[in-house]
Amino acid sequence: MKMNLPALKVGENSRFLVNQNGEPFFWLGDTAWELIHKLSLAETQLYFQNRIEKGFTIIQTVILAELDGLTVPNANGDLPLKDLDPSQPNEAYFSHVDKIIELANEMGLYLALLPTWGDKFNKKWGTGPEVFTPENARAFGASLAKRYAKHQHIVWVLGGDRVPQDKEDEAIIEQMAMGIREFDKDSLITYHPNGGVIASDIFGKSTWLQVDMFQSRHQKNFREYTFVNKARNRQPVRPVINGEPGYENIPNLLNKWNFQRLDAADVRLSAYWSMLSGAAGYTYGCNEVWQMNTAESTPLFGAHLSWQEALDLPGARQMGILRSIFESLPWQQMHATRQIFAGINWPFSPPKLALSTSDQSCLLIYQSTGSKIKLKIKKGILNNSAVYWINPQNGRVTPTKAKGSNTFYSPNRLQDWLLLILSNKQRDQWHYTSS
Protein backbone atom coordinates (compact mmCIF):
# COMPACT_ATOMS: atom_id res chain seq x y z
CA MET A 1 0.00 0.00 0.00
CA LYS A 2 1.54 3.29 -1.10
CA MET A 3 2.01 5.84 1.69
CA ASN A 4 2.56 9.07 -0.27
CA LEU A 5 4.40 10.72 2.56
CA PRO A 6 3.82 14.47 2.91
CA ALA A 7 6.73 16.78 2.12
CA LEU A 8 8.81 18.22 4.94
CA LYS A 9 9.45 21.90 5.55
CA VAL A 10 10.90 24.19 8.18
CA GLY A 11 8.38 25.19 10.84
CA GLU A 12 7.23 28.73 11.55
CA ASN A 13 9.78 29.38 14.31
CA SER A 14 12.59 28.08 12.06
CA ARG A 15 13.75 25.74 14.84
CA PHE A 16 11.99 22.53 13.92
CA LEU A 17 10.67 20.48 11.02
CA VAL A 18 7.03 19.88 10.17
CA ASN A 19 5.28 18.20 7.28
CA GLN A 20 3.23 20.10 4.74
CA ASN A 21 0.16 19.60 6.95
CA GLY A 22 1.90 21.47 9.77
CA GLU A 23 2.38 18.35 11.91
CA PRO A 24 5.65 18.11 13.90
CA PHE A 25 8.25 15.82 12.35
CA PHE A 26 10.74 14.06 14.59
CA TRP A 27 13.90 13.36 12.60
CA LEU A 28 15.01 10.00 13.97
CA GLY A 29 17.57 8.94 11.43
CA ASP A 30 19.54 5.78 10.88
CA THR A 31 22.90 5.69 9.14
CA ALA A 32 22.91 3.34 6.13
CA TRP A 33 25.62 4.88 3.98
CA GLU A 34 26.28 1.69 1.96
CA LEU A 35 22.66 0.59 1.53
CA ILE A 36 22.27 1.61 -2.11
CA HIS A 37 25.71 0.30 -2.99
CA LYS A 38 25.61 -3.09 -1.25
CA LEU A 39 22.08 -4.35 -0.58
CA SER A 40 19.64 -6.09 -2.87
CA LEU A 41 16.08 -4.82 -2.95
CA ALA A 42 14.96 -7.75 -0.77
CA GLU A 43 17.66 -6.97 1.78
CA THR A 44 16.69 -3.31 1.68
CA GLN A 45 13.10 -4.23 2.49
CA LEU A 46 14.28 -6.32 5.46
CA TYR A 47 16.40 -3.42 6.69
CA PHE A 48 13.60 -0.88 6.25
CA GLN A 49 11.13 -3.08 8.14
CA ASN A 50 13.49 -3.46 11.08
CA ARG A 51 14.01 0.29 11.30
CA ILE A 52 10.29 1.01 11.06
CA GLU A 53 9.63 -1.40 13.92
CA LYS A 54 12.20 0.42 16.04
CA GLY A 55 10.66 3.83 15.37
CA PHE A 56 13.04 5.40 12.85
CA THR A 57 11.55 8.02 10.53
CA ILE A 58 14.35 8.79 8.04
CA ILE A 59 17.25 6.84 6.54
CA GLN A 60 20.55 8.46 5.51
CA THR A 61 22.20 6.85 2.48
CA VAL A 62 24.43 7.68 -0.49
CA ILE A 63 24.06 7.30 -4.27
CA LEU A 64 27.81 7.42 -5.10
CA ALA A 65 28.98 5.52 -2.07
CA GLU A 66 32.12 5.78 0.02
CA LEU A 67 33.52 2.24 -0.16
CA ASP A 68 34.78 2.05 -3.74
CA GLY A 69 31.36 3.18 -4.86
CA LEU A 70 32.52 4.09 -8.37
CA THR A 71 34.57 0.98 -9.15
CA VAL A 72 32.84 -1.83 -7.22
CA PRO A 73 29.37 -2.69 -8.55
CA ASN A 74 26.18 -2.84 -6.52
CA ALA A 75 24.37 -6.05 -5.53
CA ASN A 76 23.03 -6.35 -9.08
CA GLY A 77 26.48 -6.05 -10.65
CA ASP A 78 26.04 -2.47 -11.89
CA LEU A 79 28.32 0.56 -11.58
CA PRO A 80 26.77 4.03 -11.16
CA LEU A 81 28.68 5.87 -13.91
CA LYS A 82 30.09 5.12 -17.33
CA ASP A 83 33.81 5.90 -17.60
CA LEU A 84 33.71 7.51 -14.12
CA ASP A 85 31.82 10.41 -15.69
CA PRO A 86 29.01 12.04 -13.65
CA SER A 87 27.40 13.16 -16.91
CA GLN A 88 27.03 9.52 -17.98
CA PRO A 89 24.86 7.75 -15.38
CA ASN A 90 24.34 4.01 -15.79
CA GLU A 91 20.60 3.49 -16.17
CA ALA A 92 20.69 0.00 -14.64
CA TYR A 93 22.26 1.33 -11.43
CA PHE A 94 19.83 4.23 -11.18
CA SER A 95 16.89 1.96 -11.85
CA HIS A 96 17.86 0.22 -8.61
CA VAL A 97 18.03 3.60 -6.85
CA ASP A 98 14.54 4.32 -8.20
CA LYS A 99 13.21 1.14 -6.61
CA ILE A 100 14.80 1.89 -3.24
CA ILE A 101 13.32 5.40 -3.20
CA GLU A 102 9.88 4.08 -4.14
CA LEU A 103 10.10 1.30 -1.55
CA ALA A 104 10.95 3.78 1.22
CA ASN A 105 7.87 5.82 0.37
CA GLU A 106 5.65 2.74 0.22
CA MET A 107 6.86 1.63 3.64
CA GLY A 108 6.59 5.10 5.21
CA LEU A 109 10.22 6.16 5.51
CA TYR A 110 11.81 9.45 4.50
CA LEU A 111 15.25 9.40 2.86
CA ALA A 112 18.11 11.77 3.60
CA LEU A 113 19.83 11.24 0.28
CA LEU A 114 23.45 12.14 -0.43
CA PRO A 115 24.21 12.54 -4.15
CA THR A 116 27.84 11.58 -3.47
CA TRP A 117 30.35 10.85 -0.74
CA GLY A 118 32.93 13.57 -0.20
CA ASP A 119 35.91 11.66 -1.60
CA LYS A 120 34.47 12.09 -5.10
CA PHE A 121 35.32 15.81 -4.96
CA ASN A 122 37.94 15.96 -2.18
CA LYS A 123 40.03 12.82 -1.74
CA LYS A 124 41.60 13.84 1.53
CA TRP A 125 41.10 10.24 2.62
CA GLY A 126 39.14 7.32 1.21
CA THR A 127 39.42 5.83 -2.24
CA GLY A 128 37.90 8.42 -4.56
CA PRO A 129 38.58 9.03 -7.37
CA GLU A 130 37.76 12.73 -7.63
CA VAL A 131 35.34 13.04 -10.54
CA PHE A 132 33.52 16.32 -9.91
CA THR A 133 34.08 19.82 -11.24
CA PRO A 134 31.77 22.75 -10.62
CA GLU A 135 30.31 22.27 -14.10
CA ASN A 136 29.49 18.59 -13.93
CA ALA A 137 28.42 18.88 -10.28
CA ARG A 138 25.63 21.25 -11.32
CA ALA A 139 24.60 18.94 -14.15
CA PHE A 140 24.66 15.93 -11.80
CA GLY A 141 22.54 17.70 -9.19
CA ALA A 142 20.08 18.78 -11.88
CA SER A 143 19.80 15.26 -13.29
CA LEU A 144 19.06 13.80 -9.85
CA ALA A 145 16.48 16.46 -9.08
CA LYS A 146 14.82 16.06 -12.45
CA ARG A 147 14.58 12.32 -11.86
CA TYR A 148 13.38 12.46 -8.24
CA ALA A 149 11.58 15.79 -7.77
CA LYS A 150 8.24 13.97 -7.91
CA HIS A 151 9.10 12.26 -4.62
CA GLN A 152 8.14 14.27 -1.54
CA HIS A 153 9.95 12.09 0.99
CA ILE A 154 13.52 13.11 0.06
CA VAL A 155 15.83 15.47 1.94
CA TRP A 156 18.99 16.26 -0.04
CA VAL A 157 22.24 16.04 1.92
CA LEU A 158 25.34 17.50 0.25
CA GLY A 159 28.92 17.01 1.39
CA GLY A 160 29.53 13.47 2.56
CA ASP A 161 31.91 13.70 5.53
CA ARG A 162 34.00 16.52 4.07
CA VAL A 163 34.92 20.13 4.59
CA PRO A 164 35.88 21.91 1.34
CA GLN A 165 39.64 22.42 1.10
CA ASP A 166 39.63 25.16 -1.50
CA LYS A 167 37.45 27.42 -3.62
CA GLU A 168 36.89 24.72 -6.21
CA ASP A 169 35.50 22.33 -3.57
CA GLU A 170 33.15 25.07 -2.36
CA ALA A 171 32.07 25.79 -5.92
CA ILE A 172 31.32 22.09 -6.51
CA ILE A 173 28.93 22.05 -3.55
CA GLU A 174 27.32 25.38 -4.42
CA GLN A 175 26.78 24.30 -8.02
CA MET A 176 25.39 20.91 -7.04
CA ALA A 177 22.89 22.70 -4.80
CA MET A 178 21.96 25.05 -7.65
CA GLY A 179 21.49 22.07 -9.95
CA ILE A 180 19.12 20.43 -7.49
CA ARG A 181 17.14 23.63 -7.04
CA GLU A 182 16.73 23.99 -10.81
CA PHE A 183 14.30 21.06 -10.88
CA ASP A 184 13.39 20.52 -7.24
CA LYS A 185 12.10 23.72 -5.68
CA ASP A 186 10.68 22.22 -2.50
CA SER A 187 12.79 19.44 -0.96
CA LEU A 188 14.91 20.46 2.01
CA ILE A 189 18.68 20.66 1.56
CA THR A 190 21.36 20.28 4.23
CA TYR A 191 25.09 19.51 4.37
CA HIS A 192 27.00 16.67 6.07
CA PRO A 193 30.47 17.85 7.22
CA ASN A 194 33.22 15.84 8.87
CA GLY A 195 33.65 15.42 12.61
CA GLY A 196 33.50 18.44 14.89
CA VAL A 197 32.19 20.78 12.16
CA ILE A 198 28.78 22.42 11.71
CA ALA A 199 27.39 22.93 8.21
CA SER A 200 26.80 26.62 8.87
CA ASP A 201 30.51 27.00 9.69
CA ILE A 202 31.06 26.59 5.96
CA PHE A 203 27.83 27.45 4.15
CA GLY A 204 26.07 29.63 6.72
CA LYS A 205 25.48 32.38 4.15
CA SER A 206 24.16 30.04 1.43
CA THR A 207 20.42 30.34 0.93
CA TRP A 208 20.12 26.68 -0.08
CA LEU A 209 21.21 25.52 3.41
CA GLN A 210 17.85 25.12 5.12
CA VAL A 211 18.77 22.64 7.85
CA ASP A 212 21.98 22.92 9.85
CA MET A 213 23.80 19.63 10.46
CA PHE A 214 26.87 18.68 12.42
CA GLN A 215 28.87 15.53 13.04
CA SER A 216 29.99 14.69 16.54
CA ARG A 217 33.09 12.53 16.48
CA HIS A 218 33.09 8.81 17.24
CA GLN A 219 34.09 9.57 20.77
CA LYS A 220 32.72 9.04 24.25
CA ASN A 221 31.45 12.16 26.06
CA PHE A 222 31.74 14.44 23.05
CA ARG A 223 29.46 17.08 24.65
CA GLU A 224 27.14 17.45 21.70
CA TYR A 225 25.19 20.20 23.46
CA THR A 226 28.02 22.66 22.75
CA PHE A 227 27.49 22.18 18.99
CA VAL A 228 23.71 22.47 19.18
CA ASN A 229 24.04 25.64 21.26
CA LYS A 230 26.49 27.14 18.78
CA ALA A 231 24.34 26.29 15.78
CA ARG A 232 21.15 27.55 17.40
CA ASN A 233 22.73 30.93 18.03
CA ARG A 234 23.50 31.41 14.34
CA GLN A 235 21.67 33.75 11.97
CA PRO A 236 19.62 32.97 10.04
CA VAL A 237 17.94 30.55 12.41
CA ARG A 238 17.74 26.96 11.13
CA PRO A 239 16.72 23.59 12.55
CA VAL A 240 19.76 21.69 13.85
CA ILE A 241 20.37 17.96 13.37
CA ASN A 242 23.17 15.83 14.80
CA GLY A 243 23.63 13.94 11.53
CA GLU A 244 26.49 11.66 12.53
CA PRO A 245 27.18 10.90 16.19
CA GLY A 246 29.41 8.20 17.63
CA TYR A 247 28.21 4.84 16.32
CA GLU A 248 27.16 2.00 18.56
CA ASN A 249 29.84 -0.75 18.63
CA ILE A 250 32.58 1.41 17.08
CA PRO A 251 35.95 1.77 18.86
CA ASN A 252 36.32 5.01 20.79
CA LEU A 253 38.14 7.59 18.64
CA LEU A 254 38.38 4.87 15.97
CA ASN A 255 41.37 3.39 17.77
CA LYS A 256 43.16 0.65 15.81
CA TRP A 257 43.14 -1.77 18.76
CA ASN A 258 39.30 -1.92 18.64
CA PHE A 259 38.87 -1.55 22.39
CA GLN A 260 36.54 0.60 24.48
CA ARG A 261 33.71 0.42 21.97
CA LEU A 262 30.83 2.86 22.21
CA ASP A 263 27.75 1.18 23.64
CA ALA A 264 24.08 1.93 24.14
CA ALA A 265 24.82 4.21 27.10
CA ASP A 266 27.09 6.33 24.89
CA VAL A 267 24.41 6.45 22.22
CA ARG A 268 21.78 7.62 24.70
CA LEU A 269 24.10 10.27 26.12
CA SER A 270 24.79 11.69 22.67
CA ALA A 271 21.13 11.61 21.70
CA TYR A 272 19.73 13.23 24.84
CA TRP A 273 22.52 15.80 25.00
CA SER A 274 21.59 16.73 21.42
CA MET A 275 17.83 16.76 21.88
CA LEU A 276 17.74 18.43 25.32
CA SER A 277 19.80 21.27 23.83
CA GLY A 278 17.05 22.01 21.31
CA ALA A 279 17.98 19.95 18.25
CA ALA A 280 15.27 19.19 15.70
CA GLY A 281 16.30 15.55 15.51
CA TYR A 282 19.02 12.99 15.83
CA THR A 283 20.63 10.32 13.66
CA TYR A 284 21.68 7.04 15.23
CA GLY A 285 24.50 4.98 13.76
CA CYS A 286 25.90 1.48 14.16
CA ASN A 287 29.38 0.41 13.10
CA GLU A 288 28.30 -2.73 11.26
CA VAL A 289 25.12 -1.27 9.75
CA TRP A 290 26.56 1.85 8.10
CA GLN A 291 29.03 -0.33 6.15
CA MET A 292 26.53 -3.22 5.70
CA ASN A 293 29.14 -5.64 6.96
CA THR A 294 28.98 -9.31 5.95
CA ALA A 295 31.25 -12.34 6.26
CA GLU A 296 32.50 -11.55 2.75
CA SER A 297 33.26 -7.89 3.49
CA THR A 298 36.53 -6.34 4.54
CA PRO A 299 35.46 -5.07 7.98
CA LEU A 300 36.27 -1.50 8.93
CA PHE A 301 36.90 -0.23 12.47
CA GLY A 302 36.77 -3.69 13.97
CA ALA A 303 33.30 -4.58 12.72
CA HIS A 304 32.65 -8.15 13.89
CA LEU A 305 28.90 -8.65 13.49
CA SER A 306 26.89 -8.97 10.32
CA TRP A 307 24.72 -5.98 9.57
CA GLN A 308 21.64 -8.17 10.14
CA GLU A 309 22.83 -9.11 13.66
CA ALA A 310 23.76 -5.52 14.46
CA LEU A 311 20.28 -4.22 13.60
CA ASP A 312 19.10 -5.37 17.01
CA LEU A 313 21.76 -3.85 19.23
CA PRO A 314 20.05 -2.15 22.22
CA GLY A 315 20.88 1.44 21.28
CA ALA A 316 18.68 1.30 18.18
CA ARG A 317 15.62 0.25 20.18
CA GLN A 318 16.33 2.92 22.78
CA MET A 319 16.23 5.57 20.06
CA GLY A 320 12.63 4.58 19.44
CA ILE A 321 11.96 5.17 23.13
CA LEU A 322 13.50 8.63 22.84
CA ARG A 323 11.19 9.47 19.95
CA SER A 324 8.12 8.16 21.80
CA ILE A 325 8.90 10.28 24.84
CA PHE A 326 9.35 13.44 22.80
CA GLU A 327 6.30 12.89 20.64
CA SER A 328 4.14 12.45 23.76
CA LEU A 329 5.06 16.01 24.77
CA PRO A 330 4.65 19.47 23.15
CA TRP A 331 8.36 19.23 22.34
CA GLN A 332 8.43 21.76 19.53
CA GLN A 333 7.02 24.35 21.94
CA MET A 334 9.78 23.72 24.46
CA HIS A 335 13.10 25.52 24.73
CA ALA A 336 16.42 24.61 26.29
CA THR A 337 17.04 26.18 29.68
CA ARG A 338 19.54 25.85 32.50
CA GLN A 339 18.01 28.63 34.56
CA ILE A 340 15.79 26.19 36.45
CA PHE A 341 18.68 24.40 38.16
CA ALA A 342 19.66 25.45 41.66
CA GLY A 343 23.07 24.94 43.22
CA ILE A 344 26.46 24.94 41.52
CA ASN A 345 26.89 23.64 37.99
CA TRP A 346 30.53 22.58 37.98
CA PRO A 347 32.08 23.22 34.53
CA PHE A 348 33.86 19.84 34.35
CA SER A 349 30.91 17.76 35.53
CA PRO A 350 28.39 16.24 33.13
CA PRO A 351 25.65 18.86 32.93
CA LYS A 352 21.98 18.40 33.63
CA LEU A 353 19.98 19.60 30.63
CA ALA A 354 16.35 20.71 30.50
CA LEU A 355 13.61 21.59 28.05
CA SER A 356 10.67 23.66 29.24
CA THR A 357 7.53 25.28 27.91
CA SER A 358 7.45 29.02 28.52
CA ASP A 359 4.99 28.60 31.42
CA GLN A 360 6.85 25.62 32.92
CA SER A 361 3.76 23.47 32.50
CA CYS A 362 5.95 20.82 30.88
CA LEU A 363 9.53 20.27 31.95
CA LEU A 364 11.87 17.48 30.80
CA ILE A 365 15.27 17.04 32.44
CA TYR A 366 18.11 14.66 31.57
CA GLN A 367 21.02 13.65 33.76
CA SER A 368 23.73 11.33 32.53
CA THR A 369 24.27 9.68 35.92
CA GLY A 370 21.82 9.33 38.75
CA SER A 371 22.03 12.06 41.36
CA LYS A 372 19.85 14.65 42.99
CA ILE A 373 18.20 17.35 40.93
CA LYS A 374 17.47 20.62 42.69
CA LEU A 375 15.23 23.06 40.85
CA LYS A 376 14.39 26.74 41.08
CA ILE A 377 10.65 26.30 40.60
CA LYS A 378 7.92 27.78 42.75
CA LYS A 379 6.41 25.21 45.07
CA GLY A 380 2.98 26.34 43.92
CA ILE A 381 3.78 25.00 40.46
CA LEU A 382 5.07 21.71 41.85
CA ASN A 383 2.06 21.28 44.13
CA ASN A 384 -0.15 21.31 41.03
CA SER A 385 2.02 19.04 38.91
CA ALA A 386 2.66 15.36 38.37
CA VAL A 387 6.27 14.20 38.54
CA TYR A 388 7.77 11.11 36.92
CA TRP A 389 11.10 9.39 36.53
CA ILE A 390 11.58 7.81 33.10
CA ASN A 391 14.18 5.15 32.47
CA PRO A 392 15.61 5.84 28.97
CA GLN A 393 16.86 2.26 28.70
CA ASN A 394 13.38 0.74 28.68
CA GLY A 395 10.97 3.67 28.75
CA ARG A 396 9.41 2.68 32.06
CA VAL A 397 7.73 5.47 34.00
CA THR A 398 7.82 5.76 37.80
CA PRO A 399 5.63 8.38 39.48
CA THR A 400 7.35 10.31 42.26
CA LYS A 401 6.75 13.29 44.49
CA ALA A 402 8.60 16.43 45.48
CA LYS A 403 8.08 15.52 49.15
CA GLY A 404 7.76 19.13 50.17
CA SER A 405 10.89 20.37 48.45
CA ASN A 406 12.29 21.22 45.02
CA THR A 407 14.83 18.39 45.22
CA PHE A 408 14.45 15.05 43.48
CA TYR A 409 16.54 11.89 43.87
CA SER A 410 16.83 9.46 40.99
CA PRO A 411 15.91 5.81 41.58
CA ASN A 412 19.59 4.79 41.39
CA ARG A 413 22.96 6.35 40.59
CA LEU A 414 24.23 3.78 38.12
CA GLN A 415 22.62 5.07 34.93
CA ASP A 416 21.07 8.04 33.16
CA TRP A 417 17.54 9.26 33.93
CA LEU A 418 14.83 11.59 32.71
CA LEU A 419 12.71 13.64 35.09
CA LEU A 420 9.36 14.79 33.72
CA ILE A 421 7.21 17.41 35.43
CA LEU A 422 3.73 18.05 34.01
CA SER A 423 1.05 20.46 35.15
CA ASN A 424 -2.22 18.72 35.98
CA LYS A 425 -3.63 19.90 32.64
CA GLN A 426 -0.60 18.63 30.73
CA ARG A 427 -0.79 15.35 32.64
CA ASP A 428 -4.36 14.81 31.56
CA GLN A 429 -3.31 15.30 27.92
CA TRP A 430 -0.20 13.11 28.19
CA HIS A 431 -0.38 9.91 26.16
CA TYR A 432 2.73 7.82 26.44
CA THR A 433 3.17 4.06 26.40
CA SER A 434 6.54 2.63 27.34
CA SER A 435 8.02 -0.07 25.12
Image (tube, helix red, strand yellow):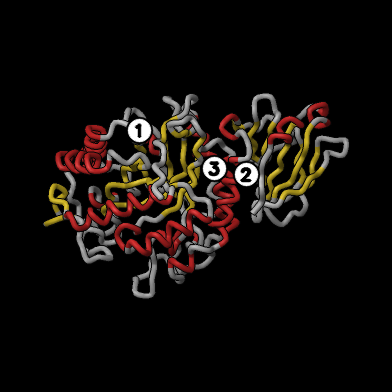
> Residue placed farthest to the bottom in the image?
295
Q: Residue 325 carries which label?
A: 2
Residue 295 lies left or right of residue 401; in this view the side is: left
State if disc 1 and disc 3 touch (CB < 8 Å). Answer: no
* Disc assigned to residue 209: 1
In space, the residues marked 3 and 1 are separated at their CA atoms by 20 Å
Asked if 191 appears above or below 73 in the picture, the reply is: above
Numbered disc in front, either 3 or 2: 2
Q: Distance between the residues labelled 2 and 1?
A: 29 Å
Q: Is mark 1 on a helix, strand or loop?
A: loop
Label 3, label 2: how far apart the Cα atoms are:
15 Å
Residue 399 appears in which quarter of the rendering?
A: top right
Q: Which residue lies furthest to the front in this view?
A: 1
Kindly identify which numbered label has been placed on residue 274.
3
Residue drawn at 31 percent across, 44 percent down: 159
Residue at the image point whose x is 57% and y is 61% from the top: 314
Say which residue appears at 59% left-offset and 35% top-offset: 331
Direction from residue 288 to residue 164 in the image, left or right: left
Residue at x-position 78% and y-position 52%: 411
